[in-house]
Amino acid sequence: MTTQNTVHKTGISHHLAEETLTAYATGSLSEAFEVVVASHLTMCPCCREKAKLLDSVGGYFVEQSDSAIPALTATEMLKKCRLSDVVQLDDRTTEQNDQSDKRPCAHEVTRETALRVPLPLARRLPASVDNLPWKPLARGIEQFELGTGSKKDGAFKLLRIQPGTQLIEHEHGDHELTLVLHGSYSDSLGRYSAGDVADLGPEHSHKPVIDSDEPCIALIASNAPARYKGLVGKLIQPFVGI
Amino acid sequence: MPAHAAVIPASQRNRLLNELGRDELSQALVAIGDNRDEAAFSIIYTHFAGRVKSFLLGKGMEENTAEELMQEIMLIIWRRAESYDPGKAAASTWIFTIARNRRIDHLRGNSRIEVELDDAMLERGLNDNLVDETLESETALAQHTGKMYEAMDNLPPEQKQVMHLSYFRGQSHGDIAEWLGLPVGTVKSRIRLALQSIRTNMQIGDADSSPFEN
């Protein structure tokens, strides 16, 4: 295609897997995964195009599906619609379920120098990324917990890792997404910088090292805890996510 | 259009009729949005109510809940049709996303997390018109949708099956793998191949293969 010549370089080289985008389109992901996916999509027009296509594939299957029998006729449903127009002012919840619980964004009016993150994540943070109550985890590693913190729910957290820090080699649970927001890290799969996402299944084992001059900030969601190799790994396993 | 039908081969005519059908549904949504057109709503309800309910039932919802939720979805369509942009999505796509989002809302009590198009972090790029913007015209969208339908119709059966099950049945790739008696890896790779062949058949430029990426 000729448009290829005018590609706007986003710098993103690690994308979401097609099956993850499909799970997002079908509504099969947990909230934590949705936050990571929507944040990556904000930064990656390439995956956003696929996501949009997958929505229209959903339309295709709706169109092709066998029809179940509705309890109401069109006329009866219209009666309900007219009635709802009358009481609409009392009942805004159904109407606005896409908008109503959009959380206010704590750092919407931050200074220009503040580290910015995509809104799907920003709305869940009590402060801008540099002002979060980071908790130290291990040498060079801090975290901000976004999930329940319970192991059975999988991880959902932000990590801030100092330059030069090397994480212990670990395998992954069932499925893990790591989105780099600032800085970068490298492992056997390549170099991950802002906007890149590592979409890893249980078959992957890696040993990331932070190779940026500034701290690396990454958003992580997994549906099972990562497994660390070796005794030291086992000891710190409960604390680290990527 | 019907005036030309006589000189169009049967296969293409069929496709054209499908497109006209889709166009009619889009126009019905627009009419609901413009002036709460009740006849238009009847067209939408008659066409989609059973299909939306079928989606909810397929996803494992029991009859009463599925019926109730389907009615809520129809009500959302009635109230929110104003926000439907016929240059942006086919009627079936718009309704699918409402149904999917309402189901998520029902299951976990909060909304699906989505990209916000006014996000200052939003990165624009290749194929913008396929991503966030309205296609140049409704005709362009109709052609795009038509190509997608054709690509879907021509998908190898085993790929179409996993896609169908993903949208209309199980919660996870694991569920689908179990139903089909296949390894999870096979399910995932069929999904990958399916999306690749849809995009290839639609001739969408792939940023992945551009020299600027990867």
Image (cartoon, grey):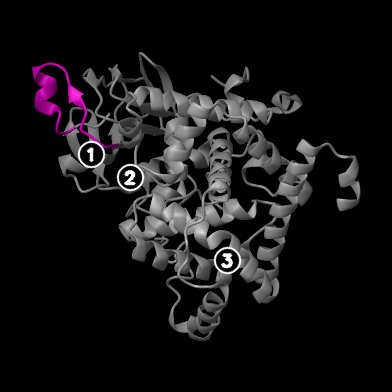
Q: In the image, are marks 3 and 2 on the same chain?
A: no
Chain for numbered disc 1: A
Label 2 residue SS: helix
- Residue under pointer 1: A154
Would residue A100 be found to the left or right of residue A32 on screen?
right
Q: Residue at horizontal 10%, vertical 20%?
A: A232
**In the image, which residues are magenta?**
A222-239
Kind of residue at disc 1: Gly
Would residue B52 be found to the left or right of residue B93 on screen?
left
Residue B201 sits inside the magenta stretch: no
- Residue under pointer 2: A32
Label 1 residue SS: loop
Q: In the image, are marks 1 and 3 on the same chain?
A: no
Compared to A74, does B153 lie above or below? Answer: above
Compared to B163, does B185 lie above or below? Answer: above
Tell me where residue B54 appears, x and y as whole percent.
45, 54
- Residue under pointer 3: B45
Q: Are marks 3 and 2 in contact (CB under 8 Å)?
A: no
Label 3 residue SS: helix
